[in-house]
Amino acid sequence: MEDDVIQGEQMLSYPIPSQEALEPPAEWAELRQRCPVARVKLPSGDEASLVTRYDDVKQVLSDPRFTRQLNAGNAARISDSESGGVFNSDLAKALPQSGAEHQRWRRMVSKWFTAKRMSALKPGIEAMAGQLIDDMVKQGHPADLKAGLGFPLPVWVICDLLGVPDSDRDKFAHWSDTLINLTRYEQSEIDAAQGEFVAYMAAHIASRRTEPGEDLLSELIKGTDAEGEGLTDAELVATGQGLLVAGHETTANMIAKMVAMLLADRSRWEQLLANPALVRPAVEEVLRFDANPGFGMPRYIGEDVEVTGGAIPAGTTVICSMAAANRDDTAFDGAGEMDLTRTPNPHLAFGAGAHSCLGQALARTELQTVLEVLLRRLPSLELAVPETELRQVEGLAVGGLRELPVRW
């Protein structure tokens, strides 16, 4: 990075591109050291402040003064679309973003994502992973592990949880992509897709209201809080949309990135083959080490605030780079090295504070289960192309690989 960029004479465009899919941008380390609160230009053209140090990112995500009220008059829009992107979307507006109402919504939904419930899902996830690997093996190699396993598995899991048919997964994928658009889609495409998405989920909730099943949405329709109040139809639709998008995008991309990271230096894969008990800490280290996670988390601050990296004035939209924070040497010994035995591992991949990822127990269960099954079924797995040829997902708020060519 040039000195004048660091000193603020020029402004970095954000997200900051990386030259290789599994490597972090060189700017991260320099920003943490020399400009921990940096002005950046978003895809919308609006300006925001980027924080990259571990302590600052954790503080911003945990401090209730930094809100998700990104529709404030002077808040930055994220995307170049009219809606401003997923963080400014109708979906985000339909769900309570702060205070008691947010906590109420979170309590009602989080009952479905406890570690105990996720453990009960594991045999089904294991069986589905095995079936998808069987299908991949039958078709022969080289194969695209993202298309054959990374994408369909979490889609099947979240569709099962929501009671929607995974046969509609291609529609869900398109709807999800348009919702998390940064620069890929035109406004007309976004509007059409989101109209279809809302109509689909509203119809599904209406059918579940008359014919309830054993799925999460059926239970939320019947459920009430301590005051006997249930979720509104708008909240139910937005909850279904949000979970479906999260189930598609983040875990599907993470499965492919996890396998790519472990195979890029095959001694990591060999270490897990020799000691499968390392799967759990290895998944946490993969989450910490992920250099291609996507946009990060935006917050809005309505008052002047100090963080360790500097002052943040009122009216600022702050972008938290959890991935840059996870490479902070002041928080992790040997932060730039992948250590599959690392413990404890207080990474920020799932965020922090009141808005930390609701589905993190599900994501962990899926990642651990997929890795266990792959190690057992395909011990000879390896990349079918050099690591430097892996291609990145572009134009969306999530990071990932377009495909993951493998052989065995």
Image (spheres, rainbow, N blue to C red):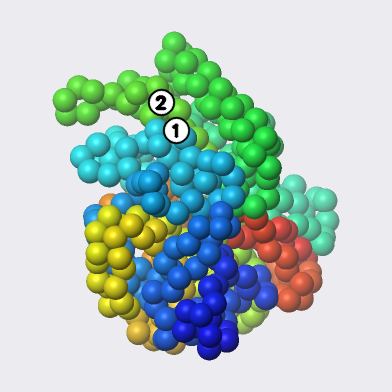
Q: For the point 17% across and 29% down, which residue is it?
A: 226
Given residues 230 and 375, the one toward you in this image is 230
* Percent coordinates x, y for residue 81 in the rendering: 59, 45
Q: Which mark is residue 238?
A: 1
Q: Is residue 376 left or right of residue 91?
A: right
- 327 to 134, vertically: above or below: below
Residue 155 in view (yes/no)? no
Residue corresponding to mark 2: 234
User: Which amino acid is tagged 1?
Assistant: Ala
Q: Is residue 76 left or right of residue 302?
A: right
- 213 to 244, vertically: above or below: above
User: Which amino acid is tagged 2?
Assistant: Ala
Given residues 260 and 271, the one toward you in this image is 260
Disc 1 and disc 2 in contact, CB within 8 angstroms: yes
* Percent coordinates x, y for residue 402 in the rendering: 71, 58
* Percent coordinates x, y for residue 30 in the rendering: 48, 85
Which quadrant holds residue 220? Answer: top left
Q: Residue furthest top?
A: 210
Q: For the point 58% across and 32% down, which residue is it?
A: 194
Query: Distance of mark 1 from mark 2, alpha carbons?
Result: 6 Å
